[in-house]
Amino acid sequence: MIKTQKEISPVTLAIEIIEEPVQTNYSFEQIIQQFNFYRQHGALITLDDVGTGINTLENIQGFLPYIFGLKFPLQNFRAEGRQEQIITELATWKKIADTNNISLVVEGVENEADDQFLDNLEISYRQGYHYGKPRLFE
């Protein structure tokens, strides 16, 4: 990944840390060492799917000083039938991001209503099918 970062510069590689079961347990210190290594080489670390699964504030709080950003998943809240919690949870994660001077990306933006909702919350970074579906370069 470091080689790729050097080759694509000035574009910056963002590495999303997702929650997946693994058989190896790394210590907090080992994880921070990796975060710092990639940051020193120009890559950015983001934590995916905050507010869902095990990515609770309690579980990720120690990582906040070492990361670039958080990703909030509208689609996960909808899939879990937790739509009514989106406003409160998103406001909480926006405050966490602002307090820690890190970015917040909202993913799962599907329509104009979602887009307007995020405008009202003054959240700039967004991803979702509302903006286009992934495709290969021509």
Image (spheres, rainbow, N blue to C red):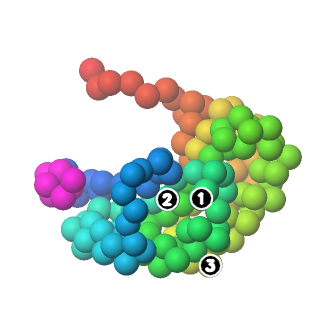
Is residue 128 inside the magenta stretch?
no
In the rendered structure, which amino acid carries the disc numbered 2?
Leu
Q: Distance between the Cα atoms at labels 2 and 1?
A: 8 Å
Q: Determine the CA span between mark 3 and mark 2.
A: 16 Å
Residue plotted at (81% across, 42% down): 83
Mark 2 packing: few (<14 Cα in 10 Å), some, or many (20+)?
A: many
On residue 47, which mark appears? 2
**Residue at 80% across / 38% down in the picture?**
81
State which region is magenta. Answer: 1-7
Q: Is residue 91 above or below residue 32?
A: above
Reading the image, the residue beneath label 1 is 55
- Among the two numbered marks 3 and 2 on one chain, the one whose residue lies closer to the N terminus: 2
Based on the picture, tell me whether residue 4 belongs to the magenta stretch.
yes
Q: Helix, strand or loop at disc 2?
A: strand
Distance Cα–Cα, label 1 vs label 3 = 18 Å
Q: Is residue 48 visible?
A: yes
Question: Who's the residue at 41% across and 50% down the image?
Answer: 22
- The answer to whether residue 105 of the structure is visible from this angle is no
Left or right position of 79 against 61: right
Question: Of residues 51 and 11, which is closer to you in this image?
Answer: 51
Q: Position of residue 120 (x, y in %)?
A: 76, 54
Mark whose residue sits in front, 1 or 3: 1
Q: Secondary structure at mark 3?
A: helix
Mark nearest the camera among 2 and 1 is 1
Label 1 or label 3, whichever comes before in sequence order: 1
Q: Are marks 2 and 1 in contact (CB under 8 Å)?
A: yes
What residue is shown at x 63% (from left), y 51% (from top)?
53
Whether 48 is drawn above or below 40: the answer is: above
Q: Quadrant of residue 75?
A: top right
Q: Main secondary structure of the magenta part?
A: helix
User: Pointer 3: what residue?
Assistant: 99
For disc 3, the neighbor class at 10 Å (few under 14, some 14 to 19, many from 20) is few
